[in-house]
Amino acid sequence: MSTDLWREILERSAEHLLLVLYAIGVAIAIGVPLGVLLTRRPAARAWALGFANIMQTVPSLALFGFLIPIPWIGGIGKRTAIVALVFYALLPILRNTFVGIVSVEPSVCDAAVAMGMTDGQLLLQVQLPLAARTIMAGIRVATVTTIGTAAIAALIGGGGLGVFIFRGVASVDTAQILAGAVPAALLALAADWGLGWVERRLAPA
Amino acid sequence: MALVEFRDVWYEIAGRTILASLNLRVEAGETVVFLGRSGSGKTTALKMINAMVFPTRGEVLVDGRRTTEWDPIRLRRRIGYVMQEVGLFPHFTVRDNVGLVPKLEGWNEPDIDQRVNLLLETIGMPPAEFRSRYPRQLSGGQRQRVGVARALAADPPVLLFDEPFGALDPVTRLELQRQFLELRRDFQKTSIFVTHDVREALLLGTRIALLAGGRLELVAAPGEFRYAPGEEARGFLACLEN
């Protein structure tokens, strides 16, 4: 293989990883606070979890079709790809945040309230630390799936390792497909291992 | 002025009456035991004192103020709370569990350390050995001792006990009951104690308030309670015979 191909693999991998990092960053910024909010607003629970569930079932191609004509977030390029990836990453993070918090031992929360903790103190000192492992597991699952899903970003000019895959499919070139698929798989494995390591270091649920 | 007072307190939920016209005054230094079966309303009555539950009719006064007028956070920090499940924070050390309310109240760290050490000594758990442990590294009896120390930490005038020794083996339970009596002698606290164990009520209470089906059947000192008339009281006293 030429050094040019190696360089492109590295560049596309970095691009791919950056797409994933942006998407996961935004999904955490939305999913964790929303998950917390759902534990405080029982009425919104079914609605929000249902919405996130439905988003996950929409085929990614169709989602692009919907997003492209929307101003600000739509169009061709990285931004649209990131928005789509955020939708897919949201559910595991949202759901695990919610589940992690509601499965904290009720007696522990009762004690916290009876000791005179405010709701904010209950959340920050008790519920989030005890839910941290579950939330981290959600982030890990979201990251690993997003690394796979991010390949389709290439379809709408978002770049990443999908560029190799689509090019390889179009020109019936197995080497090109592998140049995209193998690094994507390695990234997913590395993310799973690395985030799993962090997860095990958090306080047990 | 009574430290805690129930004035014609009712609690109704989903068409069921949990408490009906409860009237009771708890004076400083007393240990009032709410004795009753499961579902008699005793825990609901207890939770009204620290504003975890509010009456649907009537009022509960603490230090002469209605619980609805208190800031619940301030009220709860003046009331120690001990419950059967203990509810220690699994991610906090013994030191941080016991020092919780002082920390919330903004004490400085050396004062918290000093207070925690004193309390651990008092409950017979040497600080050098126990302060850095986590709850999972303690026995059931030790956990409940830490629960009691946590309730005493900010020196609250009133302590609430919700069947605190119910889940312990009989030997450990007796040890903790004896310790309760020692702590009462040393700290001079006012306590309200919920139990379904008539032995525990007679041992620990200065007065026993018998609840049945949400109604206060009678209030009596342990000496009188032994000879109390009425079906519910006789039923509880029959437990002593075997």
Image (cartoon, helix red, strand yellow):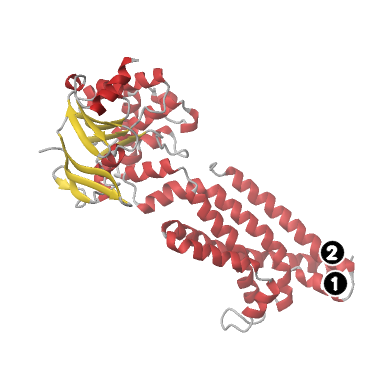
Quadrant hosting residue B49? top left
The residue under the point 41% across, 57% down is A40
The residue closer to the viewer here, A164 or B27, is B27
Tag 1, which chain? A
The residue closer to the viewer here, A108 or A186, is A108
Dot 1 falls on a residue whose secondary structure is helix
The residue closer to the viewer here, A135 or A159, is A135
Residue B79 horizontal side relative to residue A108, left or right = left
Asked if labels 2 and 1 touch by Cβ distance under 8 angstroms, the answer is: yes
The residues tagged by marks 1 and 2 sit, at their Cα atoms, a distance apart of: 8 Å
The residue tagged 1 is A168
* B108 w.r.t. B207: above or below: below
Label 1 Cα crowd, 10 Å radius (few <14 / some 14-19 / many 20+): some
* Residue A60: % across, % down: 68, 71
* B20 w.r.t. B35: above or below: below
The residue under the point 89% across, 67% down is A174
Residue B65 horizontal side relative to residue B71, left or right = left
The residue under the point 55% across, 52% down is A135
The residue tagged 2 is A178
* Residue B136: % across, % down: 49, 32
- Identify the mark nearer the N-term, 1 or 2: 1
* Residue A67: % across, % down: 62, 79
Label 2 Cα crowd, 10 Å radius (few <14 / some 14-19 / many 20+): some
